[in-house]
Image: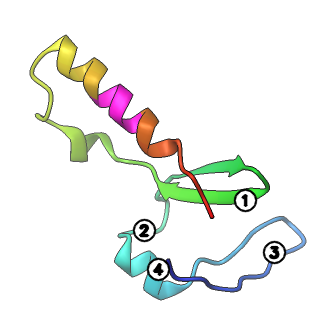
């Protein structure tokens, strides 16, 4: 895990370092999910619907995907 130091502006804004934006394909306007857990803030790019197109064939697959995504967000941070 790479750590970066960023500042918070008077409007509560931060700038994501360019190498992280590039590596995670975060372009202007990209939505991020922000989660606070145990005093730690985690941000993750929100998947675009176009990235999910065609991956599900049945309703059961949808429920499995939702369960998997929920598990991914149940992060144990050190």
Q: Secondary structure at mark 2?
A: loop
In the picture of the structure, the residue carrying the numbered disc 4 is: 20
Q: Position of residue 51 (x, y in %)?
A: 23, 47
In the picture of the structure, the residue carrying the numbered disc 1 is: 40
Tell me, yes or no, whether the two marked residues, 2 and 1, touch with CB atoms within 8 Å: no
Say above or below: 56 vs 1: above
Name which of mark 4 and mark 3 comes first in the sequence. 3
In the picture of the structure, the residue carrying the numbered disc 3 is: 8
Observer-side mark, 2 or 4, equals 4
Tell me, yes or no, whether the two marked residues, 2 and 4, touch with CB atoms within 8 Å: yes
In space, the residues marked 4 and 3 are separated at their CA atoms by: 17 Å
- Name the one closer to the observer, 78 or 30: 78
In space, the residues marked 2 and 1 are separated at their CA atoms by: 21 Å
In space, the residues marked 1 and 4 are separated at their CA atoms by: 18 Å
Please tell me how crowded label 2 is: few (under 14), some (14-19), or many (20+) other residues with Cα within 10 Å: some
Left or right, 14 with reference to 32: right
Say above or below: 4 vs 46: below
């Amino acid at each position: 895990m790479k750590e970066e130091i960023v500042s918070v502006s008077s409007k509560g804004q931060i700038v994501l370092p360019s190498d992280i934006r590039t590596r995670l394909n975060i372009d202007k306007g990209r939505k991020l999910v922000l989660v606070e857990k145990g005093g730690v803030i985690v941000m993750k790019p929100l998947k675009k619907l176009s990235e999910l197109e065609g991956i599900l064939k049945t309703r059961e697959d949808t429920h499995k995907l939702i369960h998997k995504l929920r598990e991914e967000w149940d992060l144990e941070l050190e």
